[in-house]
Image (tube, rainbow, N blue to C red):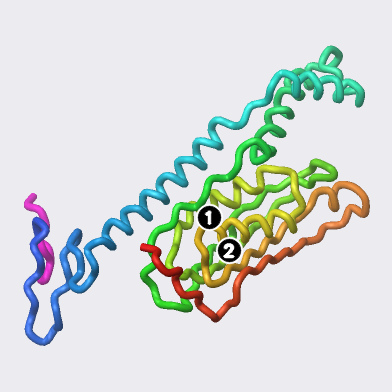
Amino acid sequence: MSPRRRGRGGSRGGRAPTPHPGRGPAQPARGQTPPGRPPETASDDAGLLEEEIQAHREIAADARSGAGADPQSVAALTTFLRSLGMDPRRDPEYTVTAQLAADFFAERTAALRREPGPLRPSRYRGHPGETVRLERIPVYGMCPHHLVPYFGTASVSYMPSDRICGIGAIARLVREISCVPRLQESLTQAVADAIERDLEPASVEVTVRARHLCLEMRGVEQRALLVTEARRGAPGAPKPPPQGRR
């Protein structure tokens, strides 16, 4: 069966389509740089795509490998569990509890031992006053007082000046900052500070909504949603690019 031919106006082998009278200028073929676009922007797009790929690879690698716990942590947790009556010598259900719990705490405190990497920006080519917004980023934090989880979502919105980063990098930033026991208020502020430092936007706003198990499983045992917000800059007033930056 012969292959189906493309409809009128299609192109093969990367050849640019022929303009038709009355239809305006022909669109560039795939892989060609549009007329009037600076040639260096193609490399900017490639850099942004590479950043996205790298961000997803790092998140996947972290999820696969885990932080791993040292033997001292496992021994300490074993003693603690026995003091609660959870002795693996008497109940086989607790045989691996200390090891798994130690691994969990090592993973969720990784940011105490490793600083989150900086965002790698690319040049922004949009119009002043435009906003980039990423919503429903999963957040898994840990209460620093009770060492029990809180979980929810984050939304990040910023108005670029002359820098922008991939959305995968923002999701990774939220994940890395949440890997330390800290108040939700502190987590929200830390995300906003990192974006302001690395991207230097005209403004940035971070909102986190989360349920706290230290509220639901103990004390008043009530289900509620805590909302925290952090703002930097002045929305609606784009900041001019710093002099001398390329």
Residue at the image position 84 percent from the left and 45 percent from the top: 145
Three-letter amino acid code at the position of disc 2:
Val
Cα–Cα gap, marks 1 and 2: 8 Å
Q: Residue furthest front?
A: 244
Instruction: Give the number of callouts.
Output: 2
Task: Name the residue that disc number 1 marks.
Answer: 170
How would you rate the neighbour count of disc 2 (Cα within 10 Å): few for under 14, some for 14-19, many for 20 or more? Answer: many
Badge 1 element? helix
Q: Position of residue 68 (x, y in %)?
A: 63, 27
Q: Position of residue 60 (x, y in %)?
A: 50, 39
Which quadrant of the structure image shows residue 235?
Answer: bottom right
Q: Position of residue 191 (x, y in %)?
A: 62, 56
Task: Name the residue that disc number 2 marks.
Answer: 156
Q: Position of residue 229 (x, y in %)?
A: 70, 66
Residue at the image position 46 percent from the left and 46 percent from the top: 55
Q: Is residue 58 above or below residue 186?
A: above
In the image, 142: left or right of 199? Answer: right
Q: Which of 126/77 is in front?
A: 126
Q: Magenta stretch: residue 225 in it?
A: no
Badge 2 element? strand
Q: Mark 2 and mark 1 in contact (Cβ < 8 Å)?
A: yes
Region of the chain picked out in magenta, as a range:
1-11
Q: Is residue 207 above or below residue 87?
A: below
